[in-house]
Image: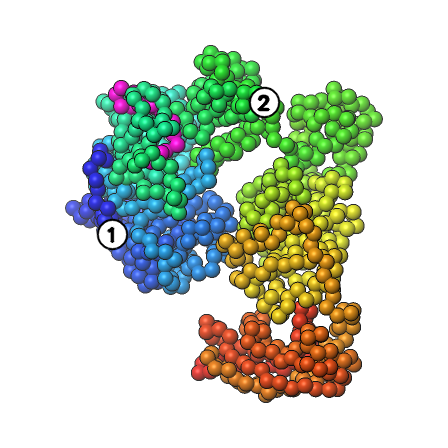
Amino acid sequence: MDGERQPQDLTLSGAVFAAFEDDPTRPALHAADGAVWTRQDVMDAVSAWRRALAAKGIGPSHRVATLLPNEAGTAVLLLSLVDAVNLMPLNPGAQPAQLAEQIAAAGADAVIAGGEAGRALAELLPEGVAFHDWDGRAPALTGEAAGPARSARKPGLVLQTSGSTGLPKRVPLTAGQMVASARNIITHLGLGPSDRAIHALPMFHIGAVVDLLAAPFMAGGEVVLARDLSAPAVTDAAQAGGTWLQLVPTALAHLMDDLSDDDARGLGKTLRFIRMVSADLPEDLRQKAEERLGLPVIQMYGMTETAGQITANPLPPGTRKPLSVGPVAGPEIAIIDAHGAILPTGREGEVCVRGATVMAGYEGDTETPRHGNWLRTGDLGRIDAEGYLFLTGRVKEIINRGGEKISPVPVERAAKAIEGVSDAVAFALPHPSLGEQVGLAVVADDALSEDDILTSLARVLAEFEMPRRIARLADMPRLPSGKVDRRAVAGMARETAEDRAPRTGLAATVEAIWAETLSVRPPHDEADFFDDGGDSLSAMDFLATLEKRLARPIPPNILFEAPRFGSLVKVLAEQPVPPRKGEGKLLRHVREATSGWRGERVGPMGLIIARNTVQPAPKVFIGTHDEMTINTFGRTITKHNPIYAMRTSWQFRGERYRRYLKPMAKIYCDEIEALIEPGEEIIVGGFCGGANMVELMMPDLKRRGIKVKFFLAMDKLFKRPTEFPVFHIWTDRLQFSHPPRYFNPARSFGDWHPAGADYVYLSGDHDWVLRGDRMKEVEDATIPYVTGAKDLPVPAPPEPISLRERRRRYRARVRAKLPDTLSLTEDTVVEVTVTNRSRKVWPPTSESGLSLTPSYTAAGEIYAHSWNRDRITFDRPVGPGESFSGQVRLRWPDEKLKAPLKVTLTMVDDGYGRFCDLGRGGVSRKVTLRGAPPGKTD
């Protein structure tokens, strides 16, 4: 199979085109809309894409990410790119902020994307990443030419693991590994020119490129694209000539439920086999499918790290063993114990692989798990005497019950075999003496009770394997790859267990009031209010407190209709909240904009999204336009705190969203009041517009008696003094930050933030600094304040004058003859005279902070101050009517800027403001770059 080494310089498209050359006019790709691409069409498109890449300066070392739908054009684009660049397909179902994080972490140089998902991503891309909006048709790139590649990479494919039991990792694969894997699939399935693969799976997995494109094409066959995985789409693809189908078990189960008997018989006559990938195939599902369709269902086992196939059951007349994933059909495998020893036949251990299709190692990870030259898969299994592999679980998922090691797989298979159970996941529950015990989450019919499930399991499981707690879920949470998110399942299921994690959100609020009113321990879901000692009087107290804390009316009979804790919380969660006048569309916009954000919706209206709520540290409420801010803060500044995301009205009715920040501020104050205990101290903060919204909340929070420890403000300018301490995170964005404006950005803290202030300055542009390792500086600076290890320092005003008196001296006359052009390399010296036109004496610069500073404006916004180049100061008092003179040097600020500028000379009160902002003194002129044609400025 894979024992013969494949040449590593072989290209995937070269291997495909070698099969195309015998008959270029033959069909190769059948689109879901009926369009047909011949082999020559595919080869021509690949050539056109290569020219388009070259025209934009994109070469083999560039990493290109793609975010595209499952269409014929995407399939051809993947085939074009995989040998020309370092290709990283992305999941179109992920949120834009998550994708932007992945792109930044992977160091991508360019992105090719289309549709709404692409346009949303374009707004969040890191600086320097070229964006190309592709319409799915012409091989052309629309964005700017690429700069030098960030790293010296080689052409190939880089994919992300599913992350079902840990954080996703990046897997680099070479063309040689993919070609070798495709040949293994061709050999095992006996693929030939008469075969047509039905491609219905997402095009960002290894199977999309190797299993369902490269293998069929290299075998001389064709590919039929299905619209989706629905029964009608699969039936249509089969009628278009499909001869084999690749599915995951969940999709097969849905297909069996949705296919009519006639369609099932028709599908069975058309297809040769169905190939099962990605997850454990229940034996009853396999039997049901084979009986209805009359064709073999072939279970295989593969990994992204091995470019796909490792083992697979053979086609008839070969033997297919129940619950086995078959013998070797790819790289070499061995069962190895924890000490690195290869185990004999029949012994259980970790499945390990080596061979031509196995990756060299995870990207950027020096600790890829290995035993010598064997890659550890993390899967447990055993090999029988005939070489068939049986998977028994995952190393990370083994449940240790008092020293008895229990694999979840037999428990899950036994549960899935019960009539009425459609899905099951076993996991570890904590136990005070045994360490762990078995928990089970099921998706099951309502008519099936917990006793029914346990009775059925007791017939096939040993006593120590029996679940001690069963949780019913409406559906299993899944990763973008379609695999069950086992960690999420365990988290959801443990909420129903006796040793559950602390409740959060609405449930935590009800729990606290329940326990306080009845003087009992926190209730379990089945606890009854009246069985816990409640009566009509305590019920009135309970409901009154609940109504106040939730800031909404509570029906007086709710406890009599739902006396049990779990049902009461459910009724409260589903209870409609009285709409606020004129805010229906606004709230709907905010909910839709946060629909994919990670975390739990909390508060009376469920607008706030909470994370890390089990932490005992002060709660942190952050205003933000997007999820990226919360992701970054959660990894750094607030990693030890509960963090609550408050999304602004951003993008609601375009640029008019700012007028809706005030009503959102009122709503979030109601939410916060319901989520905290009386007298509880919180931390608030925000990024840019999110900080503006939080500032609007501050007076309301004060009126409600809610104490704010401090305000964490990123790129936020305050227009008036604050009564609360402030920690500033400043960047190079002049519109929002002090450091680019002033010599001493903290000079005004004594007047603006008399309760306390500090800051950290990140040299970078606005939100881009959130994406890199610069946030480590913020973390080091803020953690002592966030944790309460120390308080923000209380600054003193720089002068013993009031802000009103300070502003009274903001009046000047500036005289200078400004040039109409500036050089990029040489200074232009300008003589300047400044006259004090106020009624106040200006103390020397060293005392007053007053000086004259040039600034440059482009497109209506300050482009740059030249505080780092020159300014005019004075060393004596300047009385009313008196003048001082000096020289200032001007130079074109940036070689990348070609448009005309407005240069302004104005007096500046360091840390406080510019005279010209109040219309009280300055001289301006339009200037152009010397040698450049004049043009329109602001």
Q: Secondary structure at mark 1?
A: helix
Marking on residue 316: none
Give the left or right position of residue 327, taking residue 463 as reference.
Answer: left
Q: Amino acid type of disc 1?
A: Met
- Front one among 93 and 921: 921
- Measure the alpha-carbon separation of dots 1 and 2: 64 Å
Please tell me which residue is depicted at 42% across the width and 53% down the height of the picture. Answer: 107
Residue 88: x %, y % from top left: 38, 49
For the N terminus, which image quadrant?
A: top left
> Foreground: 560 or 34?
560
* Residue 22 inside the magenta-drawn segment: no
Q: As shown in the figure, which amino acid type bears the numbered disc 2?
A: Pro
Q: Is residue 704 above or below residue 858?
A: above
Which residues lie in the magenta part?
Answer: 375-390
- Total number of numbered labels? 2
> x, y (%) of residue 135?
40, 55
Q: Where is 558 relative to 621, above or below?
A: above
Image spot of residue 905 (x, y percent): 61, 80
Residue 43 numbered tag: 1
Q: Are marks 1 and 2 in contact (CB under 8 Å)?
A: no
Task: Identify the mark at residue 432; answer none if there is no mark.
Answer: 2
